[in-house]
Amino acid sequence: MDDRRPRIALRTLGCKVNRTESEALADALSGECDVLMDTDATADVVVVNTCTVTGEADAKARKAVRHALSGGSAAVVVTGCLAAVDPDGLRALDPRVIVEADRTLLARRVASIVGASVGEGAAVRRGRTRVMVKVQDGCDRRCSYCIVPDARGLPTSVATTSVIRRVAELAASNTPEVVLTGINIGRYRDGDGAPDLAALVGLVAETGIGRVRISSIEPLDLDERLLSALSAEPAVVPHLHVPLQSGCDRTLAEMGRGYDSAHFADILRLARHALPGLSVTTDVIVGFPGETDDDFAASMGFIERAGFTRLHVFRYSPRRGTAAAHRGDQVPPGVRSARADAMRGLSDRLLRAYARTRVGSVTTVCVERTADGRARGTADDSLQVDMPVTGLVRGSVARVRIEGIEGRGLVGTVLESEVR
């Protein structure tokens, strides 16, 4: 390499945990390398952090690797979940492909290619408004559509001391918000008899960080102990992402989710009682094998009654190696697409209905960007809010009165702000 700083392009696919791991890689390499996040710019090395949760995700991952190869980089390093379950298939794409499934070795592997060294510990890059902090990995559930336990292994947890040290560093750098994230975060436990997720939330809040968010929590892990811990901490925002996957009991049973719609509704009632004003978003899979028109209608009906704020809708995509992929009653692709469109239409209606309830209320907004005299950021309930700049900069935390609805977000007036 010449005297210039090596350029590392980092392409991330899939979940928030992948995003968190990519940011940690960028932090580790940024001392001696220029790290380019999610860009097609020319680089010495391209890192592709892959997802393998569905067959469609596999195809996107391989497409991303081929695209990286077409850019002329000296090497394309592939990591993430597809690297864990199909390393040989990835290596077969091109001699320049280097597979590194072990995330603990990734930074040193990339650095060695460009002749750089790895920073000790994670840097705190200033100017970020929301930082995801990985606290857990792996999953011990065996949902019939999911390959994640094979790709990520059984649940493991980051040591509580490490989590608290990281959050304290972020708080000291005036980062407005942290998002505690994991593959199955409800399984967090730092050793036998040691802190669980409920205890961890309290310890994180004690660092003085302004806002704490939970990335996603499985419904069966949202128990009274955790809800009590969340409600006791003012820093915890009133938003939870609780994956449902289907509102049809027969489909839920065949997915192996471990609850029915009535049980899920009870969990929602407990959560909303513990956290007044709670906004709940969810994941929904449509077109699961065997899903009939009546099953889909039941799912739509339950979801509408549940009053979610917004849905993340996924068309079922068979993933080789899962129980559901081998079923003979696969739903035709066209039907899956039509059901996804219908469910996304319901999501839009639910979002508008929720947004109407917010007009006239006061909320806090973390400003993420400013341009042309306007500022935009995320409210504590996860909705996007647009407002006049009025002295705001990226990283400001503003108290905002919601004045109306615009597209899929809100518009507001700033009452007061704090520049962090």
Image: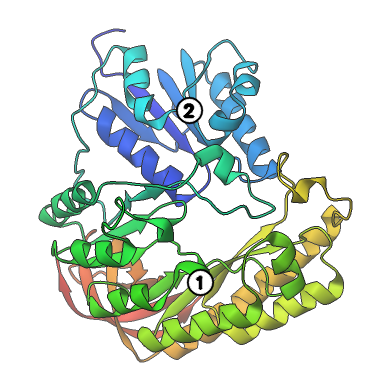
Q: For the point 47% across and 83% down, which residue is it?
A: 355
| Residue farthest along the front direction in this orientation | 192
Q: Left or right: 5 with respect to 293?
A: left
> Eyeballing the image, is 208 above or below 305?
above
Towards the viewer: 357 or 179:
179
Residue placed under numbered mark 2 in the picture:
101
Tag of residue 281? 1
The answer to which quarter of the image holds residue 353 is bottom right
Q: Position of residue 372 (x, y in %)?
A: 32, 62
The answer to which quarter of the image holds residue 385 is bottom left
Q: Mark 2 or mark 1, which is nearer to you?
A: 2
Mark 1 nearby-residue class (10 Å; few <14, some 14–19, many ≥20): many
Kindly tell me whether residue 163 is visible in this rendering: yes
Q: For the point 85% across and 69% down, which residue is it?
A: 292
> Eyeballing the image, is 176 above or below 50?
below
* Quadrant position of the C terminus in the picture: bottom left
Kindly tell me whether residue 373 is visible in this rendering: no
User: Mark 1 is on which residue type?
Assistant: Thr
